[in-house]
Each structure stands twice: as C-alpha cells, then as structure tokens.
Amino acid sequence: MIFFYHELKRMRKSISLVSLCISIILLFLTLQAQAATTSVHIVKYAFDETTILNETNVTCQWMEDNLPVHGDGETHYFHQGPVFESEWNETHPGEPYDSWNLQEDVNVESRDFGAVKGTDIKDLCDLVGGMSPDDEIMIHASDGFRKYFDYTNVYEPQARRGPLVLTWWRAEEGYVPEYFSGMRLIFFADDYVFGNWNMHECLAPKYWHNFSAVYPSTGGLSVKYVDEIAVYSMMEPSPSPSSPDDEDEEPPLSPTPSPSPSPVPSPSPILLWGPYITGTTTNTTIINWKTDITADGTVKYATEEYHTESGEYDQTITDTEKKELHHLVITNLTPNTIHHYQLTVGNESYRDYTFRTYPCTNESFTFIVYGDTREQIPLFTQMERHKLVADRIAEEENVSFVIHTGDLVCDGSNPTQWDVFFDAGRAMLANTTVYPVLGNHEDNHTNYYDAFGVPEWYSFDCGNAHFTVLDSNDWAMSYMTEQTAWLRNDIDSDATWKFVIFHHPPYSSDERHWGGWTSFRDYWGDIFINNSVNAVFNGHVHVYERYEVKGIHYVVLGCGGAPLYSLAEGKIPGYQNSFEHTLGYARITIDGDNATIDVVKVADVSGDNKEVTHIYPSHTIFERVVLNQTSIPAPAPTPTPIPTSSLSPTPTPSSSPSSSPFSSPIPSPSTTQKTSGFGVLFAIIGLLAIAYLIKRRKK
C-alpha cells in the first residue's frame, strides 16, 4: 500500500517545495554525519610506550592561526594507486610490467586529493618536544587505521617526497568537517605527485604501503580522519620529582657506572581485525580481534547509563593467553541495553565502541541485512566499494545486529583478503553484532570458521523473532538430507517472526540464471510455507530484487560492494521490485506484531563497474515493505509519506526503478521511536507552511 498517493498527486506543487526542504535538511544531516576530524591529539611517549612525556590538543583553526600554512589552495596534490597489469598494458603496451611505475603515469588521477591547505607534521611534533633520529611517529585515524614513519620522513624529507602535511582545508569543500575526508595526511611532493617509485626511493621498506600485500600504492599512506599523532621516543621516563629537602644535599660519591645500552622496546602488536562483535544474546556477547603478532588483551565495559554519567568503565575482563586471534566472552550483561567498551592490546587502547544486548520479549529492535562485499581486482577494492556500504550501516542508530548473506571475500583461503574485509567494515563491525552466511567464495575454508566461530548452519533468537542460517553451496549437497531435517526441527518454533537466510536465491531474474536456484524451492519451500516464514534473505546475484510467493517475501541483497549485475527485462512470476548497479542494504524493524523492511540506497555504479557515479544522502529509502502476520489481521496503515508496499499488486516487468514511486529518496523515521499519526500530520502541516511562506516570499 502506498500512503497518500492520490493526495500527494493533487498537491504536487506544494510537495515539490516540501521535498526541497527535506532535501536541504538531509544534505545538512549528511554532512554532519561524516567522520571528518576537527582537532588532533599530539602525544610523546617514553621508550616504554606508556609513559607520556608531553601532550596537547589543537584544532584546525589554531593550526592555521599559529603555525605555517602549506598549500596555496589552487595546486592539486596527488598520490598513486596500485598499478595493475591491465592498466599498465593500456598505458605501456608491449613493455615489461613494472608495478613501481617510474614514470608516474598509471592510476594517478584517481588519487587526486585536491587543492588543499594544512600544517607540516614536523611543526605539530615540535609542540610536544619534537623527534630524535631513533624515534618513530604514528599517524592514527578515528576509524582505527594508522601508519608509521621514521624521523627522516618527518624532519629530513627529500624534495621528491616533500613534507608530510596534515590537511584541514580543501577547495570547493572548505574547512573540516565540510572537508569530509579531513583531516588528511598528504605528501607535498615537489612535482605535486608522490608516486610509487618515490615511495621506493624515499621510505624504508617497512614503511611502504602494498595494496593486498602485492601492489605498491602511495594512496594507502594518505591517512584520512586523523585524530592523533603519537611520537614514540627512546627517552627515559621522567624521574619522580624530588622533595625540597633533598635539593641541597650533595649526592654520595660513587664510581661512575659504565653506560648500559637503552632497552629496546618490543614491537607493538598491530590490530588487523576488529574489534568486532559476535554471539550476542540477552546477557552475553563476544568481543573479537586479531593482531599481527601474539599478544594478550583487555576489554573494559559498562552500561551506557554508567558510562554517560562517569565517563568510565566499571567492568574489566582480560584474555591473558598470548595469541593472534581472540574471542573474549562477556557474560552477565543487562538485556536490551547499550553497553560501551574499550579494547586494549599491548600498550594501545582503542576508542570507545558500543554494542546492544537483545530484548527478552516483544520489545522492538532493528537489524540490517546485506551481502556480497568481495572486491574485484583490478576494477576496485573493498575499501572503495564495501566500505561505502559498511560506513553507512555504521551510521544507523540502535542496530542490534547485521546479517551478511555471503561472499564476504573473493577467496576465502587468502588471509590478506580477510584483513581487507575487516578493515573496510571496521566502523560497522566494532559497534554491532555480525552474523555471517557461507557464500561460494568463502570456499568452506577454515578462515571463515576461525573468524566467526559459527557452524555451517545455525540459528539464533532476538526478541520475538527466530533466525535460521543455512548453507546452499555445492559442498553442502552431499548432506542436504541432514541439513533439511535440522531445518524442519529448528523452524518449528513459537516465534512471532521467522526469517531464513542463505546465499543462493531460489527466485531471481538474473540474466545469467533466470528463475533462480530453483532446487531450493523443492528442498525447503514447503517447510517455509508450513512454518509461516515471513521472509527469506539471499545474496549471490549482485542486485536488489524482491519477490512475493505464497505470502513469503524473498529478498535478494547482493549489493554490498561486489561487481554489480543486470537483471533480465522479463521478470519471473512473483516479482515486486528491484534496482540494478546500485549499492545498498536493508534495515528491518520488528515492533511486536509489526515489521517493516526499508531498502536503502548508498551509491550508483557505472555499467562497467569501474567507478561510483553517484552517492546518495544517508537513509535514502528506495522502498518500504510492510510484513504482515497471516494469523492476525493486518495492522492499520500508519500515515507516513514514506512509500510502502505490502501485498501490493505486482509491478509489470517493464516498469523500471526510476519510474517507480519507491525510488524517491525520502528520509526514514527514527528506528527507536514509534511514529505517531498526529506527529506525522503536524510535521506535514509544518512543512507545507514552510512551502507556503517560500512561495509568498517569491511573489
């Protein structure tokens, strides 16, 4: 049912002005939601990497007013991306492949960081006492990403590399936070291009950035969202201050000891995965992380109420075993409550994160479904596509968990690709529980099971909903009878809402597999019907498409970052809606006997999958679907201008998303509050009044 369709049609002129107002508000909120930083914490540590010798905080405005400004606001500065063989052959046909690209003429334009202004990192280090030749510096981002450099990089830069500049202003965007990727580290090379060969010649190999551990890329050295600059020095911790009575005493005579070498600090572990959250229940969760070397770790945590009042954590739990991959179980938590936590590994304490425990009864909750996030080299990486979607999901409020419908990576046996997956999803994975589904690209590899600690098929409950995760891959066919028997027993529950998730869609209009993977209709279709399953979520086909068959919604959400597909013009029976060549996800809200699916667009991608052509404002809803219980009357529709479909007539196969009323980007209501009919009515009246005043002013 589409609310207010006829009324909106009659008032199209006024609604156009209202839409303009809403678009302006959405744009403002989108800019506010970006991760740009406006101040930086500068700290200098002693050789023990714990004792703080000096520290300060400065804003971008203070830097501009008190320190030399680099950049004229007109000259563009470039880094260089990875040089793949296909791109090399296009530019240098017949020449031997060179990933370092001495000529700096491959994949440079894609790393145009704009006409920027900023402050030399050296000047910022000097605020806390500077660096010595044996010191090292860490540039840290608010999302956990970091890069290290030595003394010569900061204080003795070669001209071809130029100074390290923390940029806080960019032409056409202005200062941070409007400069949405700032504050950003950029190398101000003398020829304005800091290429891969420059990195080879100017930086020690330990500081190089290699994309996927193979391809040199200076683009990876440009840290954005910088929030901290840490100097790790070789200085001794300052001694405790002596008392005034001791100042006049002469020290006792003693032989001068021979100098002993300064202790060499052990290497600090680098966080590769996480922190990320799994296995949450009403009173339990699991905090996970992986480091490059063995180390122990500690998690401090508290309820949001306690943390808000005190700014502290009142509980601590430590995994004392030194290992790379940790799964730390926390118990005795409060149901349906936001908890804050902080992970410490080695001497590094990470930022404050949150998770939410599950409700016990019919209390409302929200979850996310998306999938197919694998990268496609050389066209794009997960950091370029999947991160767009994951970061948008991270902006959603009060999300209890995220379900990934499979194909998390391209090659499940490749540990580097898992590193990239966890890096791209870092902001999302650190703040909500994740449930994975086996895709064909995971190849049933132990890396998948090690990361998430789930069996091949499993289920879980949240509130009054039951979720069943299945394995639809080729390797599962030999024990399909066993899996189906388990499904039949598992799905026979008293839950109000039932959802099933597996990778291959039984219904699809994919050009290359028209009809879908119909064998799963035979295996499981009757079980779904007989047990009143409400919706089935799948991936594998890299589009969004939705079908309704015998009261069950079949939703394909393979648009999380993998190369996107096209659907056939003719759609199979049961077709309801779809979009192609667009990244997105679904947000599902359960509220007692009511449930809605909001399908959210993130970005459009070109037909050849080479570039992102448009990024949508946050919370751009493509369509809203209302799920109805078959055992109870359908709830009366709540007056809301968001387009909704539930048991609606099937659109004709010739209709396109662009012509559908669902395609209008309209902001969604808060997922934490019930929408009041009167509240919406008053909101509409208020917006119409604004539109009327605008019209009067124009006259």
Image (cartoon, helix red, strand yellow):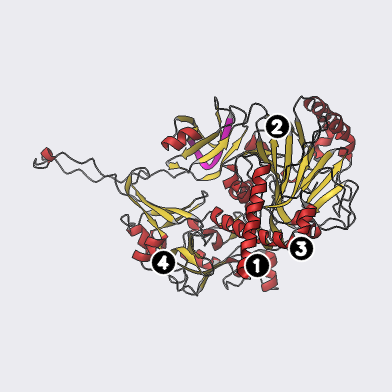
Give me the residue at 36% from left, 62% from top.
123
Q: Can residue 142 be seen in this view?
A: yes
Residue placed most toward the observer, 450 or 599: 599
Kind of residue at badge 1: Tyr
Q: Which amino acid does label 3 sit on?
A: Gly
Residue 699 percent across, percent down from the top left: 63, 71
- Residue holding disc 1: 97
Main secondary structure type of the part rendered in magenta: strand
Q: Which of marks 1 and 4 is nearer the N terminus?
A: 1
Residue carrying label 4 = 157
Determine the CA span between mark 4 and mark 3: 43 Å
Quarter residue 549 falls in: top right
Question: Mark number for residue 607?
Answer: 3
Residue type for callout 4: Pro
> Against 429, is 489 above or below?
above
CB-based contact (under 8 Å), mark 2 and mark 1: no
Is disc 1 placed on a helix, strand or loop? loop
CA separation, marks 2 and 1? 61 Å
